[in-house]
Image (cartoon, grey):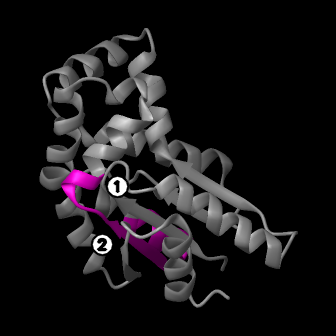
Amino acid sequence: MPPVYLFIGQSGAGKGTQVQLLQDTLRAANPAVTFFHLETGEKFRQLIEGTTYTSELTRQMMSRGELPPAFLGVHMWSHELIDDYDGKATVFIDGTPRVAEEVPLLLSAARFYGWTIDVLCLHVSDQWSYDRIKGRGRADDHGEQGVTGRIAWFHTAVEPAIELLRNSDIVRFHDINGEATVEQVHKDVCDALGIS
């Protein structure tokens, strides 16, 4: 069974960057390797910018600092798995789970597919997260309330999800200092996974 890597951490922790670096490292070692990348953050951004009724309700919730319901995230990643996963690709998961309610469903998918998941938790401080979010200028990051809301959301919603993952019997959990240089974080990720 190909490996499954799940990157999780605060907004601005560098999850997407580390996914790309690990993919580059794996591809350099084996040019034939294929990847299946579940990345719900971009899908949420597309949803927020959309014109559907669901898009409008999601925008309203987020503008009030409320969390979108778990079914939206599950819908995004589960449909992609069902429609596109071939069982042969190395799996990268980034941006999921967004709330604790998603974890049992993600773990049920993992059991269905026979996965053991390597979770790489990139730890950064609130100040680090704040500075990175303010600096990247994404549409869903604008405004002080949006930035502080994302940090608060991490603590109220994502941290409980992380603890559920940490305690799962089909997860190998790796704590990574996300405040090191990009290169050092990548080295620490590779060391944790036993990749040279």
* Quadrant the C terminus occupies: bottom right
Q: Position of residue 21 (x, y in %)?
A: 64, 64
Does the magenta-highlighted stretch encompass residue 98?
no
Residue occupying image coordinates x 64% and y 86%: 195
Q: Callout 2 environment at 10 Å: few (<14), some (14 to 19), or many (20+)?
A: many
Residue 105 location (% of width, % of height): 35, 58
The image quadrant that residue 86 belongs to is: bottom right
Q: Earlier in the sequence, mark 1 or mark 2?
A: 1
Find the magenta span and give its range. Answer: 107-128
Answer left or right for 148 relative to 48: left
Q: Could you tell me how far apart the alpha carbons at marks 1 and 2 are, in whole angstroms? A: 9 Å
Residue 31: x percent and y percent? 87, 69
Q: Nearer the viewer, residue 95 or 68?
A: 95
| Mark 1 touches mark 2? (CB < 8 Å) | yes
Residue 165 - label: 2
The amino acid type, in three-letter code, at marker 1 is Pro
- Identified at 54% across, 77% down, the residue is 114
Relative to 182, is 90 on the left or the right? Answer: right
Residue indicated by mark 1? 97
Which residue is at 57% across, 45% downward? Answer: 80
Instruction: Label 2: state its secondary structure.
Output: helix
